Amino acid sequence: MPTAPTLLEKHPLLVHLEAEQLAGLARTGEIESYNPGESIVVEGSLGDALFLILSGQVAVHRGAQTFATLAGGEFFGEMSLVEPAPRSASVTAMSATFLFRLPHDALRQLISEDSAAASVLLVQVVKTLSERLRRANQMLSSVDLLADWLAGSMV
């Protein structure tokens, strides 16, 4: 199995880190593996880590309702970077999945020890969250247009 830095250097969230920064980050977290159908996080449990998907696919859901399907190169649990709080959804592996778990405390340590690396990481998280919000807004706009059309067609 390749080393953690080798796997991490390909993740879009980390591609802008220098080799030393990446190696330091790799030491603060751990690679975890999950089988299809295996629970990774459970809604309501303490969210104390960010998860980078190295390979595989996961479902983000509440009960049977899936909100998102994420795959290699994506991440979840980003709200735990701000503060540990209850998880807003559950995440289950849909295939054999390898993740890098970055604990909240490791990020706090990174901020104090290497603020440049922390800034690079956090800027990439914010960019991704901005893209997700933009897509959600477009979806909501489409739903509003459909609702208006349906209301107009019933008159």
Image (cartoon, grey):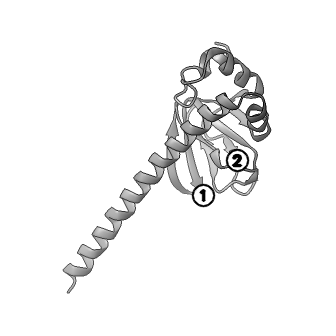
The outermost residue toward the top is 2
Report the residue marked by disc 2: 80
Which residue is pictured at 36% across the width and 57% down the height? 138
Q: Which amino acid, by three-letter code, is at mark 2?
A: Ser
In which quadrant is the C terminus drawn?
bottom left
Crowd around label 2: few <14 · some 14–19 · many ≥20 (10 Å): many
Who is closer to the viewer here, 92 or 89?
A: 89
Numbered disc total: 2
Precedes in sequence: disc 1 or disc 2: 1
Q: Which amino acid, by three-letter code, is at mark 1?
A: Arg
Task: Identify the secondary structure beneath mark 1.
Answer: strand
Position of 67 compared to 111: left or right? left
Q: Is residue 127 above or below residue 3?
A: below
Q: Is residue 153 above or below residue 142?
A: below
Q: Position of residue 95 (x, y in %)?
A: 56, 34
State which quadrant residue 39 falls in.
top right
Name the mark on residue 62: 1
Which residue is pictured at 69% across the width and 54% down the height? 87
Who is closer to the viewer here, 59 or 12?
A: 12
